[in-house]
């Protein structure tokens, strides 16, 4: 369908309260998304602590472009295209590693410094008198147009022009502020392993689900019920159930009416946050030890301000989902109209007791990992949506819930209630704006 449509026509597939199903499965629209969104906006690459040493690198996908995030000899983080300028071979075939002081192409042994500059070429005399100059940047590895970081979180943009990273993130940068401020030392460090999941569904379906407060107690009811029953039995037998059971049982012990009392705040560029849910602050020895460490670094007043931030989830459109109180992050890498890679990461709070990390690790494994029933519940729905949207059972996807009833103040939209579909409408406003740009 989109092959005969221009960008303006495709943007018209988005209406204020509904979108045409074509945007989820048309391959030409997917190509437009890659060129006009993922190849232009700021895309998350990783955390500075993923590459602590000179020569450390991680490979990452930005839109359709294979890239390398590397710490160079000057201790600067570079983001390079994973391509040799000679014959086009990928430079790094591994996901991560340490390349030392240079990269070497495995095909013809061209060597590059870790900032991408050409270092050596075998038998370089063969290029004298040709149109290829080995002295300029013609033979260097190409760099991302812009690289920047915010509180240790590294982003790159493949477009030389556009808003700064801070302007792009806008109010959404609270995701990183909240996570880092919860560390007694004001910083986090990444746990250098992640779960990688390929979902058989369109990338937008995953992001729409992240702040969908209507689905948890419905989609995850059976998983939450089983955990709640076991939690009850253990508590009856021993007087106390492990905290980990609460991570799962909350999907049923927090009823739908409570989810409706939460609230989303929706910002420009498609970013949103869900607030008013996280009330868990146990008074056990581990928590008290953590609070003592916070008091030592911040003082009691500032500690209470930090721990009083009641944000459950921040969505940084178009490719990042952050649960800052739990130190979790999910990066979205579209692979095709019906294939999406998600990378699921977690972090340590520097200066916090080990038990606090273990608590967050429990949530990471029990709720966000690919092996949990919670994730399986979601993945099944994502696949069902993908299949249904490719059918002729209807042309439009409804985002009508509380449409026209939310509060808009200078482009910041506060939802009437937590189950409003304001975040989805906000995402597609940004989507349509980016798609329509020349």
Image: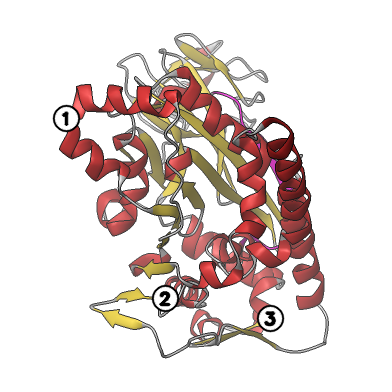
Mark 3 surroundings within 10 Å by alpha-carbon count, few (fewer than 14), some (14 through 19), many (20 or more): many
**Residue stretch rendered in magenta on the structure:** 192-203
Residue 21: give its label.
3
CA distance separating discs 1 and 3: 52 Å
Query: SS for tag 1?
Result: loop
Residue at (28% x, 58% y) in the render:
170
Q: Mark 1 or mark 3, which has the lower sequence index?
A: 3
Q: Which residue is mark 1?
A: 299
Residue 280 sits above or below residue 427 on the image: above
Residue at (56% x, 60% y) in the render:
210
Mark 1 surroundings within 10 Å by alpha-carbon count, few (fewer than 14), some (14 through 19), many (20 or more): few
- Residue 113 in view in this figure: no
Q: Which residue is mark 2?
A: 433
Residue at (55% x, 46% y) in the render:
331
| Magenta stretch: includes residue 384 | no
Residue 385 sits above or below residue 407 on the image: above
Task: Tell me the quarter of the picture where residue 154 sits.
Answer: top left
CA distance separating discs 2 and 1: 44 Å
């Amino acid at each position: 369908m989109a092959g005969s449509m221009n960008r303006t026509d495709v943007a018209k597939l988005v209406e204020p309260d509904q979108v045409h199903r074509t945007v989820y499965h048309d391959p030409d629209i997917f190509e437009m998304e890659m060129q006009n969104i993922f190849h232009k906006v700021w895309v998350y690459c990783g955390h500075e602590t993923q590459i602590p040493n000179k020569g450390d690198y991680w490979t990452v996908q930005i839109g359709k472009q294979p890239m390398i995030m590397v710490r160079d000899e000057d201790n600067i983080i570079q983001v390079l295209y994973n391509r040799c300028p000679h014959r086009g071979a990928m430079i790094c075939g591994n996901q991560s590693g340490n390349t030392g002081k240079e990269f070497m192409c495995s095909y013809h042994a061209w060597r590059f410094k870790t900032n991408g500059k050409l270092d050596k070429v075998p038998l370089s005399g063969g290029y004298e008198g040709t149109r290829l100059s080995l002295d300029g940047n013609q033979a260097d590895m190409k760099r991302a147009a812009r690289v920047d970081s915010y509180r240790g979180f590294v982003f790159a943009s493949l477009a030389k022009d556009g808003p700064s990273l801070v302007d792009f993130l806008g109010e959404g940068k609270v995701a990183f502020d909240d996570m880092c401020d919860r560390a007694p030392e004001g910083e986090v460090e990444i746990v250098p392993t992640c779960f990688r999941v390929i979902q058989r569904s369109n990338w937008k379906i995953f992001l729409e689900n992240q702040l969908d407060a209507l689905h948890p107690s419905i989609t995850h009811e059976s998983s939450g019920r089983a955990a709640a029953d076991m939690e009850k039995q253990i508590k009856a037998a021993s007087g106390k159930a492990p905290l980990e059971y609460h991570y799962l049982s909350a999907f049923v012990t927090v009823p739908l009416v409570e989810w409706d009392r939460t609230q989303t705040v929706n910002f420009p560029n498609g970013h949103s946050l869900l607030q008013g849910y996280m009330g868990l602050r146990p008074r056990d020895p581990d928590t008290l030890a953590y609070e003592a460490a916070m008091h030592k670094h911040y003082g009691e007043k500032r500690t209470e301000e930090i721990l009083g931030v009641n944000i459950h989830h921040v969505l940084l459109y178009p490719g990042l989902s952050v649960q800052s109180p739990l130190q979790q992050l999910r990066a979205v890498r579209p692979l095709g109209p019906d294939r999406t890679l998600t990378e699921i990461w977690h972090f340590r709070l520097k200066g916090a007791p080990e038990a606090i990390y273990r608590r967050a690790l429990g949530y990471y494994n029990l709720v966000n990992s690919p092996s949990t029933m919670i994730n399986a519940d979601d993945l099944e729905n994502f696949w069902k949506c993908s299949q249904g949207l490719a059918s002729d059972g209807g042309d439009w996807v409804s985002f009508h819930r509380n449409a026209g009833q939310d509060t808009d103040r200078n482009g910041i939209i506060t939802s009437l209630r937590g189950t409003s579909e304001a975040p989805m409408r906000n995402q597609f406003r940004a989507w349509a704006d980016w798609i329509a740009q020349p």
